[in-house]
Image: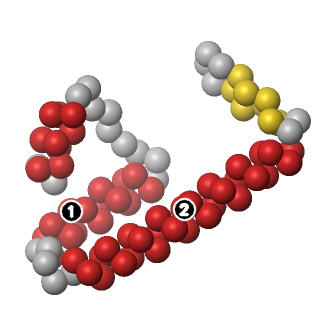
Amino acid sequence: MFIIADMSNSIIFDRKNYNKLLRKQNDMESEVSALKEIVFELSKDEVKPAVVKRLESQSKILDKGGGKRFLNLKEFKNHLKNL
């Protein structure tokens, strides 16, 4: 049994279901990586190099676990415009 807990909730998984979830997560991450590469190749000529550099910088921050919270959709859209 595995127990995944945070400050307010606990979830109990048996080993079989936990491993199944991990496999699904890895599959999804590999699919997202493949899609990311495809989109990058397709849009390579359409996006300015400076924009690509800023987006790669943001991607590295997210890969390291960093992030930003937005209170609403408008704030999120403004953030994307300013990248």
Left or right for 20, reference 57: right
Vertical side of 47 occupied by 41: above or below: below
Vertical side of 26 occupied by 70: above or below: above
Residue at image position (14%, 74%) is 47
Number of the label disc, if any, that sits on residue 29? 2
Q: Where is residue 71 in the image (x, y as percent from the top left)?
A: 26, 26
Q: In which quarter of the image is the C terminus?
A: bottom left
The residue labelled by disc 1 is 54
To which quarter of the image does residue 48 belong? bottom left
To which quarter of the image does residue 11 belong? top right
User: Badge 2: few (under 14), some or many (20 or more) residues near its Cα, within 10 Å?
Assistant: few
Question: CA gap, disc 2 to disc 1?
Answer: 22 Å
Looking at the picture, the colour scheme in use is secondary structure
Mark 1 residue element: helix
User: Badge 1: few (under 14), some or many (20 or more) residues near its Cα, within 10 Å?
Assistant: few
Q: Which amino acid does label 2 sit on?
A: Glu
Q: Which residue lies furthest to the top in this view?
A: 8
Mark 2 residue element: helix
Left or right for 55, reference 35: left
Q: Where is residue 2 in the image (x, y as percent from the top left)?
A: 82, 36
Q: Which amino acid does label 1 sit on?
A: Arg
The residue lying toward the viewer, choosing from 38 and 69, is: 38
Q: Position of residue 78 (x, y in %)?
A: 12, 41
Residue at image position (40%, 45%) is 66
Front disc: 2 or 1: 2
Residue at image position (21%, 34%) is 73
Q: Where is residue 25 in the image (x, y as percent from the top left)?
A: 62, 55
Q: Earlier in the sequence, mark 2 or mark 1?
A: 2
Q: Quadrant of the N terminus?
A: top right
